[in-house]
Each structure stands twice: as C-alpha cells, then as structure tokens.
Image: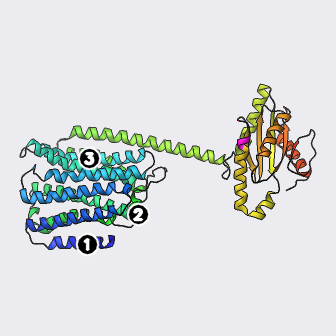
C-alpha cells in the first residue's frame, strides 16, 4: 500500500503539470489529492496501536485544514486576509504538535543539546525571515493591519515547523523509512513556502514570473508532494516504530550539523554586511538581537560539550576501576584503595584486615557447565558475598576466580567471623577457600596481600571450603586450583 501511494505521488505531480490553465480545475485536482492523503493517513493510523495514532491524527488534521483552504480560496477568493488563510495557517500548529508528540515519545528524558542546536539554526534563519519577509509584510501599506499580521504569520509558522523538524532530526530514536517520509514531507512544505516567497520577491522587483505557468505549477507540485508523502509514511509497515522510545544516549554533533550551526551563526554578520554594502542598516535592532542570541546559544552549546566531555572522562575513569563482569572494583581500584585504608588505620590506631577468596574447583565447574555458566557463578557469587559483608567492607575482584576483601576496624576474630558469613552465602552449592591477614602496622600493601594469599594456599591444601588466618612468619605452600 505504501509503495502504491509512493507511485501516486509521481503521478500526481505529472498530472498537475499538464492540467488546463484553469483555476477551478487545478484547485479541484489539488483538493482531491489533499483529501485522499488525509484518508490514507487515517487508514494508516487505524492499523497502529491506539497509543501510536495521535501524531498521525494531528498530521491528518493539518492536511485536512490545508485541503479545505484550497476549496475556500477557490469559492470565496478574497484579498489578504482571505477566509482561506486561517485554514492554510492551521497546517503549521497541527504538524508542529504532531512532531512534538513524536519527539516526546521517542526520547527518554530531556535532550537539551538537541534543543540548543535546533534553536541556533532556527534563530539564524529567523533573522532572514524577519529581514526579507516579516518586516516587509509589516511595513506594507497596501494591506490592513490584520492583513500584515496574516502575511507575517506564514513565515512564523514556517519557523515553528522548521524548529520542530530540526529538533526531531537532532534528537534520538529510530530512523526508518517512515521517519524519513515524514521528514521529506515537512521539508517539501518548507521548500514550497520558500519558493512562494522567492516568486513574490521576483514579482516585486519586476520579473514577470506570474506568467510562467510551468514555474508556478512546479511550486504547486511541491505542496502536492508534501501532502502525499505523509500517507507513504503512515501506510509503511514500520510506521509504528517512528514513535518507539530510544535509549538515553547523548546527541552526537555530526559534521553536517556543525556546518549548519556554523552557517546559521554567520547569517547575522552576512546580513549586516549586505545592508552596509547597500548604504543603510535597515534592520539594526533585529541583527543585534539575533547576534546576541546566537552568541549565547553558542556559548551554552560549548558549555554542554565541555560537560559531555567531562562526563565521558569520568565514565572512562570509572570503567577503568570497575570489573566488567561483576561490577565490583577491579584490581586497579583495589591497589589504590588498600594503601589509603592502611594509612587511615595507622592514623586512627585501629586494626584492619584483608581476606583473599578463591572459588573451589572453579576450573572443574567451567569444564562441566561451560564458561557462560562460570560467568554467571562469578556474578551471582559477587552479589551474594557483597550482601553478606558489613557496610564498611570492600569486596573487589582480584583476577579470575579470586576476590579480595578489605575489612576496616576488624581484628582476626571479627574478620574471620565476617568471612564465614560470606562463605555461607556462596550460591549454587559452591564453596571457596580464604586466607585472612591482619595488618601489623609496618608491612606494605603487597606484603599484607602476600600473607593473606599464603593463608589461602594453606586453606586449599587442608581440604578447601575453609578460612585460614595468616601466620607470621608465613611459609609459602604450592598453590592448588
């Protein structure tokens, strides 16, 4: 169905170009195309879950208002403000609301970065709209004040729609075919409005473009394409995924986006240069306001970028100190923490103990049940052991199936009691052997670990599934797996 309507888009453009030069005929054809597009969007929406229908209903409402505006313009005519203008203008808030709903549903949380990027681009283009469309319309003495407001409302609507489109493109979420059909439709509306502005300007400076039927029909065809691309997206089999929520990853600044933001930031000085070259700065206030707004937006965007870099650096540091499998501190973090704990114990005059734990017969478990099962054992054991320790204790993965525990303010008796509780919590009917060493107040971190490790080997040699306190001096025993 989607492919059929895509083919109809091409056919509609061709037919519109060859229609007789009669306003009623062309209006009737364009109205029929518009209402067909509305019906197709509603049909596509009806196939979706109820929660996913609202954006498409809003798009259909905008298309319906625009198509009805063609009928009213043909029947009633009139100068600006014409009875058809409210219907044509209704397209913008309906489509902007539809895009706002999509943005809200596609993203988890607020994406301020994308909002700033959209505001930067829209502000720059907004100055162009003010200088060349809105301000001249407001100064047009040939129409009433209401007519001036109506003429200004069209570019304002375009700016709102542009801002929402840029925000959608800079945001997160799936970008399948329906997403791009919707994007293409909104872009066609904006390009069509821009083309009308250009044609109007050419008429004002003396070019007789109103007599070039092919040119005018081409601009009208842009609106037909815009109306018919929405149904192509609505009827696509993947239409439901356009509003699917995305992850919370940050918005990336690509080269295209950076180029657009740079170009938007340069619009104000370029407009100023053009007016200086013409001998008079007509829109000085607007240029100053736009320049200040763009400057603040760029500064804020730089601050966001710095914050993002700092957060990424912090995450890298945390990942470097965290064991990927168990989520526990890794050996690097342990080697940083233990000397601080020993220094604190020296300063406070309190005991501190270290225990080294090693799962018994882990290699046999891996060979029997496979490495994925071994990984699950390590994860579940780490979680169970962590829950059995005191709040002040620190459990870290030392390597492989070996773990270490820092027990502040614990002598040998207290440390062995805590490790016994940890041993009892070992899941999947597994056991471990452990060695416990109390710091003597003089030895280094490595020497303390070596004593606890030697006690661990002794526990292994004595039959496993037990806790051995370290002796001083210690004797090295051959390790057992």
Query: Which residue lies under the disc numbered 3?
Result: 126
Secondary structure beneath dot 2 equals loop
Q: Where residue 357 appears, x then y in whole percent?
A: 80, 47
Q: Where residue 411 appears, x then y in whole percent?
A: 83, 33
Please tell me whether residue 27 belongs to the stretch shown in magenta. Answer: no
Q: Disc count in the image?
A: 3
Query: Which residue lies under the disc numbered 2?
Result: 176
Please tell me whether residue 389 belongs to the stretch shown in magenta. Answer: yes
Separation of marks 2 and 3 at Cα, in angstroms: 30 Å
The label nearer to you, 3 versus 1, is 1
Q: Where residue 285 appears, x then y in whole percent?
A: 23, 37
Q: Quadrant of residue 343?
A: top right
Sort mark 1 into few (<14), some (14-19) or many (20+) by Cα contacts within 10 Å: some
User: Marks 3 and 2: in contact by CB < 8 Å?
Assistant: no
* Viewer can see residue 96: yes
Could you tell me which residue is drawn at 24 percent across and 62 percent down? 38
Q: How is the image coloured?
A: rainbow
**Front in this rendered view, residue 365 or 481:** 365
Does 292 appear above or below 204? above
Query: Which residue lies under the disc numbered 1?
Result: 8
**Front in this rendered view, residue 281 or 81:** 81
Separation of marks 2 and 1 at Cα, in angstroms: 21 Å
User: Marks 1 and 2: in contact by CB < 8 Å?
Assistant: no
With 146 as the anchor, is 11 left or right in this view? right
Secondary structure beneath dot 3 equals helix
* Residue span colored magenta: 386-391
For the C terminus, the image quarter is bottom right
Sort mark 3 into few (<14), some (14-19) or many (20+) by Cα contacts within 10 Å: many
Q: Quadrant of residue 475?
A: top right
Could you tell me which residue is drawn at 88 percent across and 45 percent down? 455
First in sequence: mark 3 or mark 1?
1
């Amino acid at each position: 169905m989607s492919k059929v309507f895509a083919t109809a888009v091409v056919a509609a453009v061709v037919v519109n170009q060859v229609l007789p030069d009669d306003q009623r005929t062309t209006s009737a054809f364009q109205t029929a195309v518009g209402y067909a597009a509305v019906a197709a969007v509603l049909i596509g929406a009806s196939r979706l879950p109820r929660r996913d229908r609202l954006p498409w209903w809003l798009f259909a409402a905008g298309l319906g208002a625009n198509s009805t505006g063609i009928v009213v313009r043909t029947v009633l005519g009139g100068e600006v403000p014409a009875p058809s203008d409210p219907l044509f203008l209704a397209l913008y808030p309906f489509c902007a609301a539809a895009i706002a709903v999509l943005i809200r549903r596609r993203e988890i949380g607020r994406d301020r970065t994308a909002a700033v990027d959209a505001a930067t681009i829209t502000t720059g283009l907004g100055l162009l709209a003010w200088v060349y469309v809105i301000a001249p319309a407001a100064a047009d003495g040939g129409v009433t004040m209401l007519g001036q407001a109506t003429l200004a409302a069209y570019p304002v609507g375009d700016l709102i729609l542009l801002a929402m489109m840029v925000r959608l493109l800079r945001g997160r979420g799936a970008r399948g075919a329906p997403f791009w059909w919707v994007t293409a439709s909104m872009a066609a509306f904006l390009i069509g409005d821009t083309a009308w502005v250009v044609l109007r300007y050419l008429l004002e400076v003396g070019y007789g473009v109103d007599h070039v039927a092919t040119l005018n029909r081409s601009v009208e065809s842009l609106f037909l394409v815009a109306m018919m691309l929405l149904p192509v997206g609505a009827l696509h089999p993947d239409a439901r995924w356009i509003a699917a929520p995305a992850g919370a990853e940050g918005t990336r600044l690509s080269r295209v986006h950076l180029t657009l933001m740079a170009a938007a930031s340069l619009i104000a000085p370029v407009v100023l240069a053009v007016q200086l070259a013409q001998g008079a700065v007509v829109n000085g206030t607007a240029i100053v306001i736009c320049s200040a707004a763009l400057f603040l937006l760029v500064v804020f965007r730089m601050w966001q970028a710095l914050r993002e870099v700092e957060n990424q650096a912090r995450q890298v540091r945390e990942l470097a100190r965290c064991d990927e499998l168990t989520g526990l501190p890794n050996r690097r973090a342990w080697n940083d923490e233990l000397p601080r704990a020993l220094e604190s114990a020296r300063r406070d005059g309190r005991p501190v103990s270290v225990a080294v734990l090693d799962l018994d017969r882990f290699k046999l478990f891996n060979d029997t049940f496979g490495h994925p099962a071994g990984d699950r054992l390590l994860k579940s054991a780490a979680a169970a052991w962590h829950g059995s320790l005191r709040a002040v204790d620190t459990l870290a993965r030392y390597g492989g199936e070996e773990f270490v525990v820092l027990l502040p303010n614990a002598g040998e008796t207290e440390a062995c009691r805590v490790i016994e509780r940890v041993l009892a919590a070992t899941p999947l009917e597994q056991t471990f052997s452990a060695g416990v060493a109390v710091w003597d107040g003089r030895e280094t971190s490595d020497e303390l670990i070596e004593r606890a490790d030697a006690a661990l080997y002794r526990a292994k040699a004595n039959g496993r599934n037990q806790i051995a306190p370290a002796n001083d001096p210690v004797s090295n025993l051959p390790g057992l797996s």
